[in-house]
Image (cartoon, rainbow, N blue to C red):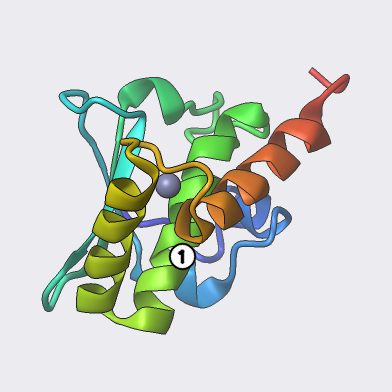
């Protein structure tokens, strides 16, 4: 799916710092057969593709992304969309792979490439804390 820029879903993500150009570029697909919660890949011609587990795409009764802390995983992946746009697809893949080698971790939380996205994710969690 693509997120309609005029939709409440877009508005909800943008209140957490997601930019229009990231939403415009991102293609989002449910994919449950992966180790982590989600992954963002640079696809030639198509652009950044987010593969995310169904559990993290929670919709409200209006079929919009629920205004809740569940947005945090999409926020994290849209941070990677920005990296793909800023660095280019090849450099993104190289840096992401190297971050995993360097930290000897699939999640590479302490690497700069990931820590910035985990931090954006944590801000979403903090925003909804006590509101749900
Ligand atoms: Zn990440």
User: Does the image show residue 63?
Assistant: yes
* Relative to 115, 113 lies left or right: left
Examine the rendered structure and indicate whether residue 64 appears above or below residue 2.
Answer: above
Examine the rendered structure and indicate whether residue 105 appears above or below residue 22.
Answer: above
Residue wearing tag 1: 23
Which residue is more in the foreground, 115 or 3?
A: 115
Which residue is more in the foreground, 132 or 78?
A: 78
Q: Is mark 1 on a helix, strand or loop?
A: helix
**What's the residue at 46%, 70% (across, down)?**
82
**What's the residue at 48%, 26% (across, down)?**
58
* Relative to 63, 49 lies left or right: left
**What's the residue at 25%, 56% (across, down)?**
97
* Relative to 125, 48 lies left or right: left
| Residue lying furthest right | 130
Location of residue 67 in the rendering, given as x and y in whole percent from the top left corner = 67, 34
Res 18 → quadrant:
bottom right
Which residue is more in the foreground, 8 or 89?
A: 89
**What's the residue at 74%, 43% (across, down)?**
123
Location of residue 53 in the rendering, given as x and y in whole percent from the top left corner = 31, 27
Which residue is more in the foreground, 2 or 44?
A: 44
Res 98 → quadrant:
bottom left
Location of residue 39 in the rendering, given as x and y in whole percent from the top left corner = 30, 44
Location of residue 99 in the rendering, given as x and y in whole percent from the top left corner = 36, 55
Other residues around mark 1 within 10 Å, as few (<14) / some (14–19) / many (≥20): many
User: Does the image show residue 64?
Assistant: no
């Amino acid at each position: 799916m693509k997120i309609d820029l005029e939709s409440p879903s877009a508005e909800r993500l943008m209140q957490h710092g997601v930019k229009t150009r990231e939403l415009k570029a991102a293609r989002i697909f449910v994919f449950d057969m992966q180790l982590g919660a989600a992954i963002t890949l640079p696809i030639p011609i198509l652009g950044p593709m987010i593969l995310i587990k169904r559990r993290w795409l929670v919709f409200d009764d209006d079929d919009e992304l629920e205004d809740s802390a569940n947005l945090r995983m999409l926020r994290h992946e849209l941070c990677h969309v920005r990296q793909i746009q800023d660095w280019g697809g090849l450099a993104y893949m190289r840096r992401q792979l190297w971050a995993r080698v360097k930290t000897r971790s699939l999640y590479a939380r302490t690497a700069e490439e990931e820590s910035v996205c985990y931090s954006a994710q944590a801000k979403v969690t903090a925003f909804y804390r006590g509101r749900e």
